Amino acid sequence: MAPIRNSAVVFAEVPSGYPEVGKHIKYVKDRTIDLDTVDTQGGIVTKNLVISIDPYMRGRMRAADKKSYSPPFELNQPLTNFFVGKVVKTDNSKFKIGQYVYGFGGYEEYTVHPKAQTDALRIISSEELKLGLPLTTWVGAAGMPGQTAYHGFYHIGEPKKGETIFITGASGAVGQIVGQLAKREGLTVIGSAGSDDKVKWLQTELNFDHAFNYKTADPKAELAKFDPLNIYFDNVGGDQLEAALDAAANYARFIECGMISQYNQPDSHGIRNLMAVVGKRLKLQGFIILDKAKDPSFQQEFYSKVPKWIANGELKVKEDVTKGLEQASEALVGIFQGKNFGKAVIQIADD
Ligand code: NAP
């Protein structure tokens, strides 16, 4: 077989503020791969079908010597992230041609996964495929963001019926699942998002008890109506974290999941009322969901429940799917301006 196209989105330059398409990340269409001769190093090759867009990718657009919890992207190499691909070549007895795998793949049409990297790939079982979820959902509500919502809400938030929770970034990949889990457990659910359409959807489709547009309403005044909060699920940091500190009950739990309002700011926003942590005896706990990938009991708990809840409609899922790697850079940059409505994901190929 002759070499075939293997177009990609590559990391081209380290940004200092918002990343720019064509400067910091670039679509490259003149790459190829020869599936007959490519060396799998005892691993597999996948045809990549869907790949996730996640806010933490901004932190990976950094200089190679700067330390953080996730590895930096390599200059002039495809971006990598959670994906679903189909096995098209295997030199490893664990995998069969035609299986669908979830794990880390490239923003490219085909990825070579050497043996050392295949341990981290999860085969989507035939029983799971029978649930009929779109492949995009396996990188969303049934993948890393769903795990983030589930672990953060249940294990850090320790929710109790009748409590009040505030969720920022509430219409996004993580927030929309947290809100539904909280309704399911009998909490009063308040959410914020960055457009009136998103706010309306939270109230009408997901039955949030209250939602507001943080760009046009004053978060402190909105939260004062529901004071005190027992749980804050923080996706954005900044002003809304300050507002949540003001409205918190004694012994409230702050689930520190992310602070997207800070990711493109060279200087971080100082939190002016942090003393509330002491006075109100708050628990603030950050977490990185990647740690849970190595926890078999968590994986079993999550995958035995959440995909079924999605399939039977107990959990609704809103996805913002962009077709084609050509459009991926715009879609990636767009999440930092709130352009996605729901979980952002790229459909690279149909099958
Ligand atoms: P997402 O909400 O689907 O997409 C990002 C959203 O953030 C945008 O649509 C936008 O929505 C909002 N946003 C962008 N800039 C903002 C700003 N300056 N201020 C306030 N909101 C802003 O993303 P996600 O995947 O669900 O992630 C949500 C958060 O969870 C992020 O902070 C992410 O880093 C974090 N996270 C953490 C872990 C972990 O292991 N700790 C894992 C996954 C995700 P609006 O229109 O509402 O502004």
Image: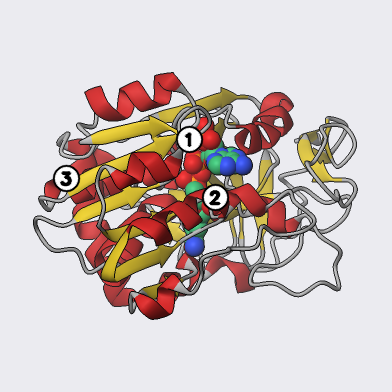
Sequence order check, earlier mark of 1 and 3 = 3
* Residue holding disc 3: 183
Question: What is the quadrant of residue 278 in the picture?
Answer: bottom left
Q: Residue 214 carries which label?
A: 1
* Residue 316, position as x, y percentages in the image: 25, 34
- Mark 2 and mark 3 in contact? Answer it, CB < 8 Å: no
* Residue holding disc 2: 239
Instruction: Estimate the spatial distance between the alpha carbons at disc 2 and disc 3, rounded to whole Å.
Output: 25 Å
In-image side of 307 versus 259 (left or right): left
* Residue in view at x 60 percent, y 31 percent: 348
* Residue 315, position as x, y percentages in the image: 22, 39
Mark 3: secondary structure:
helix
* Residue 254, position as x, y percentages in the image: 38, 66
Q: Label 1 sits on what residue type?
A: Tyr
Q: Which mark is residue 142?
A: none
**Res. 50 in view:** no
* Residue in view at x 48 percent, y 49 percent: 240
The total number of labels drawn is 3
* Residue 72, position as x, y percentages in the image: 76, 63
Residue labelled 1 has its Cβ within 8 Å of some atom of ligand 1: yes
* Residue in view at x 82 percent, y 38 percent: 32
Q: Label 2 sits on what residue type?
A: Asp
* Residue in view at x 75 percent, y 51 percent: 265
Q: In this view, does 78 lie above or below 91?
A: above
Mark 1 Cα-neighbour bin, 10 Å: few <14, some 14–19, many ≥20: many
* Camera-side residue of 62 and 124: 62
Instruction: Estimate the spatial distance between the alpha carbons at disc 2 and disc 1, rounded to whole Å.
Output: 10 Å
Sequence order check, earlier mark of 2 and 3 = 3
- Mark 2 and mark 1 in contact? Answer it, CB < 8 Å: yes
Mark 2 Cα-neighbour bin, 10 Å: few <14, some 14–19, many ≥20: some
Q: Label 3 sits on what residue type?
A: Lys
Question: What is the quadrant of residue 253 in the picture?
Answer: bottom left
